[in-house]
Amino acid sequence: MAGPVLEEPHMNIPTMQDVLGERLVDAREAAHCLNIPTYLLTHPSERNRLRVPHYRVGKLVRFKLQELIDWLEQQGGKSHA
């Protein structure tokens, strides 16, 4: 019979942030950080029309702030409101 697997104390288990490279945020947090209207991120038709970079995590939509910053700069810094 096999016993439990023992991990060495110095082994690091990667977090989701380590795997993704950047923390994913929801539309409300992203809109607040970037000072843009929340509806641009929450309405699928607006996201698609403006080609907003986003990720589907199951039924949730999440964003990487740096990708949104880059996207805004490509748009000329406009909020598209």
Image (cartoon, rainbow, N blue to C red):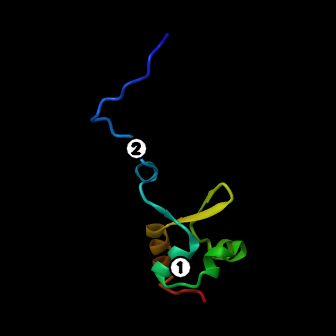
- Residue 22: image tag: none
- The structure residue drawn at horizontal position 62% and vertical position 64%, both measured from the top left corner, is 61
Q: Nearer the viewer, residue 45 or 56?
A: 56
Residue 30: image x %, image y %? 51, 74
Which residue in the rendered view is the most extreme toward the right? 45
Residue 22: image x %, image y %? 43, 59
Q: Nearer the viewer, residue 1 or 65?
A: 1
Q: Check the image and report above or below for 77 versus 15.
A: below
Residue that label 2 marks: 14
Asked if labels 2 and 1 touch by Cβ distance under 8 angstroms, the answer is no
Left or right of residue 36, residue 8 in this image: left
Q: Nearer the viewer, residue 69 or 35?
A: 35
User: Which residue type carries mark 1?
Assistant: Ala
- Residue 31: image tag: 1
User: Which residue type carries mark 2?
Assistant: Pro
Disc on the earlier residue, 1 or 2: 2
